[in-house]
Amino acid sequence: MEIESVPVTITLFLISVLVIAVAGTRMARIADRLADATGLGEAFVGALFLGGSTSLAGIVTSITAAAQNHPELAVSNALGGIAAQTMFLGVADIVYRKANLEHAAASVATLVQATLLVTLLAIPLMAMAGPDISVFSVHPASLIIPIAYFFGLRLVSEAQKMPMWGPRQTDETRVEEVVIDNKSEQSELTRLWLQFALLAVIVAIAGYSVGTAGVALSVQTGLSESLVGGLFTALSNSLPELVTMIAAVRQGALTLAVGGAIGGNSFDVMLLAFSDFAYRQGSIYHALAARQVFVVALTILMTGILLLGLLRREKHGIGNIGFESVLVLILYLGGFSLLFFQT
């Protein structure tokens, strides 16, 4: 689908963003109910079901861009989404006024998720810097990433069920209480799953529209694919995560907010693997510019700071906002400002 008019492109882009925000928010509410009904817990549901489903728009956007021979847009959308969702945790910390969010939401599961994310991000970074090898136009790293993700997800589940150690409990610590709703009938669960699947399809279609509009916007305006993907499409596709995170924090579901964001970021690393399969010109990792390497390094740095904040557990930083959250916000704004002025 070719779009020749800039106003039409912007209109399609904005409508798709609105659909993603509304449908994604509804998906988050259903996921929270499913977590109670199944007893899987907020961290696991947030990482797998909610993180994966709200990433559908980003998945379709990246695959669409890669299939249309726009590797920079595909990868920048994936990496920009991870960076944006990490930055959103700083925004959520501002909303949560009782204490530093990293202190209140500290848990073994979130620590494992953050460590997994750093590990996963190191794989594409090595692929970008390593030799240009591919089998049927697919780099071996694209096979390693999904395997590492699902192995790490198993570690998260084990850490949540049988933790070998845990954070010290304080008055500000919010501990998730897994409530199994035994009254939920099978028909009710079926209805929730069907609603969840329908909304996921809607988000995927909207993601395709965002990807198509993003490619057209890059061509029509002359903006670089790195800037369009890293900012416009990435932020748009991340709207469900932002709305979900803020709503969860206000409801006191801190594990769902932090665990869902970090776990969703780990899932989003697989967008790089999906994009590599869709890109038929060779390894997508070696079709990229230095900007993408910069964004990977920036995201690793932001996640590392967040991980240190979860370990340090400062109760009150600047007001009730953790020093780590402030630093993450500064790094995100500063890093993408450099990319903007470099374009």
Image (cartoon, rainbow, N blue to C red):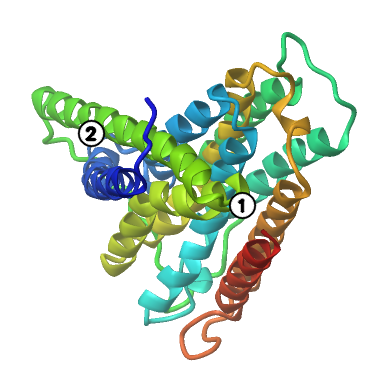
Closest to the camera, between mark 2 and mark 1, is: 2
Residue 241 - label: none
Q: Residue at x 40, y 57 (%)?
A: 257
Residue 215 in percent (x, y) is at: 48, 38
Question: Secondary structure under badge 2?
Answer: helix
Compare residues 266 and 184 and report the one nearer the observer: 266
Which disc is residue 199 wearing?
2
Question: Residue drawn at (62%, 35%), measured in percent from left and top?
Answer: 152
Q: CA distance from mark 2 to mark 1?
A: 28 Å
Tell me if residue 195 comes above or below residue 99 in the rendering: above
Check disc 1 and give the amino acid type: Ala
Label 1 secondary element:
helix
Q: Residues within 10 Å of mark 2 (few under 14, many from 20)?
A: many
Query: Residue 47 placed where, x, y %?
Result: 46, 42
Q: Residue furthest front?
A: 4
User: Do we see residue 98 in this rendering?
Assistant: yes
- Farthest residue in the bottom direction? 319
Q: Quadrant of residue 213?
A: top left
In front of the other: 255 or 168:
255
Q: Count residues near mark 1 (Cα–Cα under 10 Å), then give few for <14, some for 14-19, many for 20+.
A: many
Residue at the (22%, 41%) spot, across then down: 30
User: What is the three-letter code of the residue carrying label 2?
Assistant: Leu
Instruction: Name the residue that disc number 1 marks.
Output: 114
